[in-house]
Amino acid sequence: MHYDPSSRLFTGRLVLRPTVPGDVERALEIRSNPAVARNLVSATIPPDPGKMTSWFRGHADEWRDGTAYRLSIDLDGRMIGVCDVFDIADAEGEIGYWIDEAVWGRGFGLEAAKRLLRFAREDVGLKRIRAGCADDNAASSAILVRLGFDRLEDVRVFSKSREAEITQRRFQLVASR
């Protein structure tokens, strides 16, 4: 799929757009909040600016290669989070999202995830989509259930952000639904 940083996906209140290297500063600000980072198993607290910069620089290449699609979640022209489709192979992939704590509880996670899911199915062509979240992240679990995901299993994984092993709930959605 062609990488076009000017492309936009719209919801009722949000705009999802391909991330660009200029998003790093805001992403670092959001991810520096331990309440946000603790829900991401591969995140460090505080985030490493060099690694975050390198990660964002690689997003356009991932997009062009069809291996991942990283999108900024914007509200009124300001990034409030990131959502993505990643680990794509053989019409399967995984979705994820993280949102600024300042806007939690307003339905933006569900709204962004719903549009991301539509993108993953219709534009990327995924037939099976996976997702995971910490077992104590009730909001993320609720989003996935509302979107029609089935809970598969609970697995033990190491969380860098928590510096401990946690239980992660694994979900999947199959296109036949």
Image (cartoon, grey):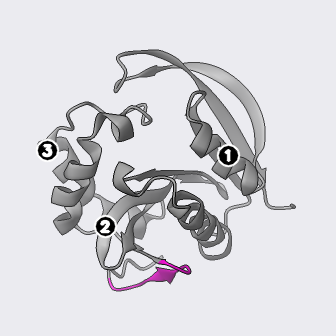
- In the rendered view of the protein, which quadrant contains the C terminus? bottom right
Please report whichever mark, 1 or 2, sits nearer to the chain's N-terminal start. 2
Residue under label 2, please give it: 79
Residue under label 1, please give it: 142
Label 1 – label 3 distance at C-alpha: 31 Å
Kindly report which numbered mark, 2 or 3, lies closer to the viewer in this rendering.
Answer: 2
Majority SS type along the magenta span: loop
Kind of residue sitting beneath label 2: Met
Over which residues does the magenta segment extend? 6-13
Please report whichever mark, 1 or 3, sits nearer to the chain's N-terminal start. 3
Mark 1, Cα crowd under 10 Å, few <14 / some 14-19 / many 20+, is few
Kindly report which numbered mark, 1 or 3, lies closer to the viewer in this rendering.
Answer: 1
Q: Residue at x 74, y 54 (%)?
A: 146
Mark on residue 49? Answer: 3
Mark 3, Cα crowd under 10 Å, few <14 / some 14-19 / many 20+, is few
Q: Residue at x 67, y 59 (%)?
A: 91
Q: Are marks 1 and 3 in contact (CB under 8 Å)?
A: no
* Helix, strand or loop for disc 1: helix
Kind of residue sitting beneath label 1: Ala
> Does residue 128 appear left or right of residue 21 in this picture?
right
* Helix, strand or loop for disc 2: strand
